[in-house]
Amino acid sequence: MEKAKAPEGKLIIVSAPSGAGKTTIVKYLLTSGLNLGFSVSATSRQIRPGEVDGKDYFFITPEAFRIKIEEGDLLEWQEVYKGNFYGTLKSQVKFLLDQGKNIIFDVDVVGGLNIKKHFGDRALSVFVSPPSPEELENRLRSRNTDSEETINKRMEKARWELGFAHRFDYILVNNDLETAKKEVFKVVSEFLKL
Ligand code: 5GP
């Protein structure tokens, strides 16, 4: 009997420091006709108002997360924020590839590099960068949602994350959102056509 053909979808990985505009870029790509499916991660953090279980994340308990790690269900996982675990489900990747889709991942920088390592040339890793650390700080402040302590913590983490940018295939500087969207569309669509 002929062997089933392996699914041939490609992988787009998007990582960034918080506040760089990553989510907007990912949402834009998902609606751009690129046959992309979003890899819904598992997380142990609390669900936020407006989020939908199974769509934004699979919200599970820390104990259920620990079992997933032990059973080898995760392609990668990170404790992105203290006490909050996030991980890419192997079953999601298979599900999307079986549907003939390309996959887009919204993951932290370390997770992004791990996924790239796993898939090699089949994946394109994109780092969304703010124009400068100062601009990032301005953006975080203008959200007006975070305390001084939270902003300082996020900035400390962001500086650390910016140090990983050069290890990604492509650095997308998000200075002007419309320009960044056009640029990322070009890079991703060219990669998917390869
Ligand atoms: P948030 O809690 O704001 O939804 O996400 C926090 C961070 O976790 C974001 O940078 C997001 O990209 C990252 N993240 C989400 N899912 C995963 C995952 O499966 N693996 C890793 N390594 N990071 C993730």
Image: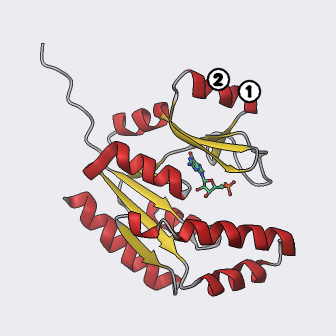
Mark 2 Cβ inside 8 Å of ligand 1? no
Q: In which quarter of the image is residue 78?
A: top right
Q: Are marks 2 and 1 in contact (CB under 8 Å)?
A: yes
Q: Measured along the vertical axis of the image, is residue 165 above or below residue 5?
A: below
The residue shown at (46%, 33%) is: 90
- Crowd rating for badge 2 (residues with CA inside 10 Å; few <14, some 14–19, many 20+): few
> Of residues 38 and 136, which is closer to you in this image?
136
Q: How is the image coloured?
A: secondary structure
In the rendered image, residue 23, in percent from the top left (x then y), is placed at 58, 64
Picture quadrant where residue 154 is located: bottom right
| Residue at disc 2, secondary structure | helix
Q: Identify the amino acid type marked 1.
A: Glu
Residue 172 placement: quadrant: bottom left
Residue 154: give its label: none
Q: In this view, does 94 lie to the left or right of 177?
A: left
Q: Which amino acid does label 2 sit on?
A: Ile
Mark number displayed over residue 63 = 1
Figure label count: 2
Who's the residue at 61% across and 72% down the image?
Answer: 159
70, 64: nearer the viewer: 70
Q: Residue 67 carries which label?
A: 2
- Residue at 70% x, 46% y is 52
Q: Where is residue 143 in the image (x, y as percent from the top left)?
A: 77, 78
Spatial CA span between label 2 and label 1: 6 Å
Q: Residue furthest left?
A: 1
Q: Is label 1 within 8 A of ligand 1 (CB to nearest ligand atom)?
A: no
Work out which quarter of the rendered image holds the N terminus and state it: top left
